[in-house]
Image (cartoon, grey):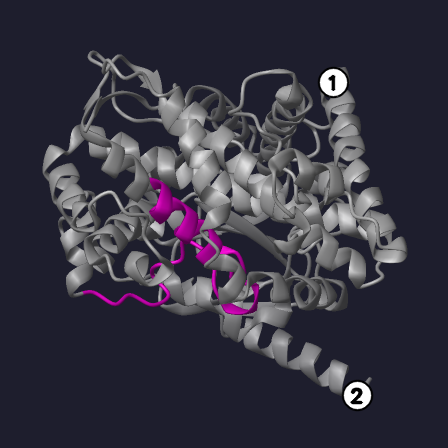
């Protein structure tokens, strides 16, 4: 108790020497409804991320406060503050109540929704599933990518490849997690249930994303489709959980009939769900963790692939250079080492993740009175006080585009920049610190493998004529509003 009192006293004394950061000049200085309404409008039509960046420049500061229904929220795009939140002062912050309230009905208590000891348990439970031997198993991708390629018109006509990427990553993620794919890319009756699951999941994540950004005022709006979709998602996953638990107890796997249907012993392959079932945790915990990892493994990879092909269709120089590197393999499937050694491919993905981070912003809340290292004072270089319970939004999208961090060409797509830069806390596409994404290598490996196989199959790419500039579509992750409409010419 004496120690806690000393810490509290130190914080209060320190506050006397701290100057506040800048405050957004609200038209509504009581509730901040002007920004809430503007944010709601931009989330619906696009342009939200660029508007966030514009507000920083308007304040001439990388850290400022705004109002959200009388709550004073801190916004920051400063790497020093983000480093403090994610690493050096990690225990001072946790997920914001707004995020938890939005995520819980669907995702329950999993690695991306919990804090403290519960989060540590989840991370320890899941980490073994993302060792290199599992991440480097490329067989899981090949059949599904073949289905994707078969969906692309051979006459060069336009296709929304983003829609196919979201189907692809749903198929690969469910294969890895459940031991059986949703088969959204496969036509016919066997995929109908998986397709319904994908549709329900897409709708729910869209609503959860809006609630996480705008608060629980949105959640109070009755929405039967939302609640019905959550129910179906849970039932779908629980079906696989029950089979895996039965297998762990009695030794007859959910995969016996599936293996016969596929002409192979599928239970010899690593199945994420079966490994979780062996740990003895309860079925709800397994379901929650599966849905948490599905969100991380499916949506992020689909978004990364979508932004990549949007750029490739508009940058023939990048496409040609990338394809030349890919074609050193001929038509052979790459192995994990070959993927990692394709430098221009890795530079391209790094640059996509810089300009179009799939999780473009995030939020935390202080668990106690604390400070952030910069943002206060007239020069923005003094510490600022953060009160217990105060929310902090940190914008990766804005930070990744700062010219003082990346040079005057920061807004240009330039993979070559990665030949000579080694950024640290100013580049965070997968978060950092103890909460760094444990599935990042899985996502990057799947994206790399998919790009290689597509560029082996197609020799040129073009965008649909007459499309305007890129605008984002924000759910829980970022993707391209209106889709990625391109034509591909077979090799």
Q: What residue is rendered at 83% in x and 51% in y?
A: 247
Residue located beneath label 1 in the image: 223
- The reply, left or right, for residue 408 in relation to residue 394 is left
Residue 173, horizontal then vertical, whole percent: 57, 42
Q: Is residue 476 visible?
A: no
User: Is the residue 9 above or below the residue 181 in the image?
Assistant: below
Q: Among all residues in the image, which is located at the extreme bottom?
A: 2
What's the mark number on residue 97?
A: none
Image quadrant where residue 204 sits = top right
Q: Are marks 2 and 1 in contact (CB under 8 Å)?
A: no
In depth, the one of 9 and 260 nearer the eye is: 260
Residue located beneath label 2 in the image: 2
Confirm whether the magenta stretch covers residue 482. no
Q: Residues within 10 Å of mark 1 (few under 14, many from 20)?
A: few
- The reply, left or right, for residue 436 in relation to residue 340 is right
Q: What residue is rendered at 44% in x and 24% in y?
A: 163
């Amino acid at each position: 108790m004496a120690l806690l009192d000393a810490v509290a006293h130190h914080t209060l004394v320190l506050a006397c020497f701290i100057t506040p950061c800048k405050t957004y000049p609200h038209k509504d200085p009581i509730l901040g409804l002007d920004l809430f309404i503007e944010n709601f409008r931009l989330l619906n039509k696009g342009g939200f991320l660029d508007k966030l960046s514009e507000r920083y420049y308007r304040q001439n500061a990388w850290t400022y406060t705004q109002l959200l229904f009388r709550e004073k929220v801190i916004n920051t795009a400063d790497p020093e503050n983000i480093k403090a939140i994610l690493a050096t002062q990690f225990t001072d912050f946790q997920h914001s109540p707004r995020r938890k309230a939005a995520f819980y009905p669907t995702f329950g208590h999993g690695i991306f929704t919990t804090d403290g000891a519960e989060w540590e348990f989840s991370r320890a439970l899941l980490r073994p599933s993302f060792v290199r031997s599992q991440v480097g198993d490329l067989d899981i991708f090949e059949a599904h990518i073949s289905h994707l390629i078969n969906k692309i018109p051979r006459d060069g006509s336009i296709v929304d490849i983003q829609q196919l990427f979201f189907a692809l990553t749903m198929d690969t993620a469910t294969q890895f997690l459940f031991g059986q794919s949703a088969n959204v890319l496969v036509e016919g009756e066997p995929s109908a249930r998986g397709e319904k699951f994908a549709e329900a999941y897409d709708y729910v994540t869209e609503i959860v994303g809006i609630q996480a950004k705008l608060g629980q005022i949105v959640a109070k709006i009755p929405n039967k489709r939302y609640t019905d979709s959550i129910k179906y998602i849970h039932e779908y996953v629980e079906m696989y959980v029950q089979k895996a638990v039965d297998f762990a107890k009695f030794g007859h796997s959910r995969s016996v009939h599936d293996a016969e249907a596929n002409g192979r012993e599928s239970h010899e392959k690593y199945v994420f769900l079966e490994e979780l079932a062996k740990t003895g945790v309860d079925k709800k915990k397994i379901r929650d963790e599966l849905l948490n990892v599905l969100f991380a493994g499916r949506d992020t990879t689909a978004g990364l692939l979508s932004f990549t092909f949007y750029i490739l269709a508009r940058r023939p120089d990048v496409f040609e250079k990338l394809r030349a590197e890919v074609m050193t393999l001929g038509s052979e499937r790459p192995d994990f080492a070959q993927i990692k050694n394709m430098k221009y491919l890795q530079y391209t993905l790094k640059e996509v993740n810089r300009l179009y981070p799939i999780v473009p912003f995030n939020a935390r809340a202080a668990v106690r009175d604390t400070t952030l290292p910069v943002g206060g004072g007239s020069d923005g270089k003094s510490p600022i006080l953060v009160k217990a319970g105060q929310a902090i939004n940190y914008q990766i999208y804005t930070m990744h585009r700062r010219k003082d961090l990346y040079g005057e060409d920061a807004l240009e797509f330039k993979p070559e920049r990665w030949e000579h830069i080694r950024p640290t806390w100013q580049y965070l596409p997968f978060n950092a610190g103890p909460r760094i994404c444990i599935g990042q290598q899985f996502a990057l490996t799947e994206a790399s493998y998919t790009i290689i196989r597509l560029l082996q199959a197609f020799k040129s790419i073009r965008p649909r004529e007459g499309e305007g500039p890129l605008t984002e579509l924000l759910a829980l992750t970022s993707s391209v509003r209106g889709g990625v409409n391109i034509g591909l010419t077979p090799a």
